[in-house]
């Protein structure tokens, strides 16, 4: 059974960089066949896709966030990570990592989510 | 970006009711439409992918239909555990986008 687990600081100061890691268990990122995404949900709101990475390191980011986002992968640790720079209060959200089987573009496994608050 | 619009935004229903939620895309997305269920404090759960394919482990009372721009999620007989918020998602083009959600409440 594949499991994803987000980790990282729950509080980030304005203008700093938000950094989160997603650890995958029950399956290997380097086996291919899946895209690994970050998705966020503002409090009480809908879902916003941030970007994805493939095991090879290929990435694609939401144009709305592209200038501030970096997603990287560490296949030796079976992890992928998110960095979001120059954060403001508008970046306060629950951040999820998720797996996307590249045949359909859906997200079949999700982490439990981690709330990141941007505040001084 | 493709805009996804769900209706209604909220819905009250009773256990045993048949419920339909609609999702409309701002342009044709073929059958690249997925449905999720989200309960408070939990991650979304995939119910339906490719418009009508039931995700493994999801009860058969859930079904999806549609293609092009108009899609529906139907729950044939509501169970107590089905009260949640439901989201559609288009995976036709990047960036993938979600509907605003439909909150299904107990009448």
Image (cartoon, rainbow, N blue to C red):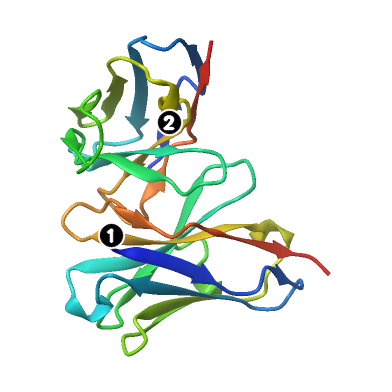
Q: How far is disc 2 from disc 1 in space, using C-alphas? A: 22 Å
Residue density around tag 1, few if under 14, some if 14–19, many if 20 or more, within 10 Å: some
Whether residue B64 is visible to the viewer of this picture, yes or no, is yes
The quadrant where residue B86 appears: top left
| Residue picked out by circle 2 | B5
Chain bearing mark 1: A
Horizontally, residue A25 falls left or right of residue A88, namely: left
Residue B61 is left or right of residue A48, and the answer is left
Q: Where residue A30 appears, x then y in whole percent?
A: 23, 81
Percent across and percent down for residue B27 are: 30, 36
Query: Mark 1 sits on what residue?
Result: A100
| Residue A120, disc | none
Pick the residue in front: A120 or B70: A120
In this view, A109 is above or below A29: above
User: Would residue B1 be visible to someone looking at this image?
Assistant: no
Looking at the image, which is closer to me, B42 or A37? B42
Residue A84 position within the rendered picture, expressed as x and y whole percent measured from the top left: 57, 73
Q: What residue is shown at x 43% (from left), y 31% (from top)? A: B5
Determine whether the residue tagged by mark 1 lies in a helix, strand or loop. strand
Q: In this view, does A31 lie to the left or right of B38?
A: left
Q: Say few, some or many: other residues with alpha carbon within 10 Å of mark 2 (under 14 / 14 to 19 / 20 or more).
A: many
The one of B12 and A18 positioned closer to us in this rendering: B12
């Amino acid at each position: 059974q594949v499991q994803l687990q987000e980790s990282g600081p729950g509080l980030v100061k304005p203008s700093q960089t938000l950094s989160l890691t997603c650890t995958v268990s029950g399956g290997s990122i380097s086996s291919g066949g899946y895209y690994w995404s970050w998705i966020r949900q503002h409090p009480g709101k809908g879902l916003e896709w941030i970007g994805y990475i493939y095991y090879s390191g290929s990435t694609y980011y939401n144009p709305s966030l592209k200038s501030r986002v970096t997603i990287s992968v560490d296949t030796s640790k079976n992890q992928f990570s998110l960095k979001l720079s120059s954060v403001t209060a508008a970046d306060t959200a629950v951040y999820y990592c998720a797996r996307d089987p590249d045949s359909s573009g859906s997200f079949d496994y999700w982490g439990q989510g981690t709330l990141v608050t941007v505040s001084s | 970006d493709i805009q996804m619009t769900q209706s209604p935004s909220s819905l009250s229903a009773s256990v045993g009711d048949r419920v339909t939620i609609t999702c409309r895309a701002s342009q044709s997305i073929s059958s690249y439409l997925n449905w999720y269920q989200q309960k408070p404090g939990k991650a979304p759960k995939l119910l339906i992918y490719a418009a009508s394919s039931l995700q493994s482990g999801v009860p058969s009372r859930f079904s999806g239909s549609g293609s092009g721009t108009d899609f529906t999620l139907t729950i044939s007989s509501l169970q107590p555990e089905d009260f949640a918020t439901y989201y559609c998602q288009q995976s036709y083009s990047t960036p993938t986008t979600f509907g605003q959600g439909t909150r299904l409440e107990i009448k």
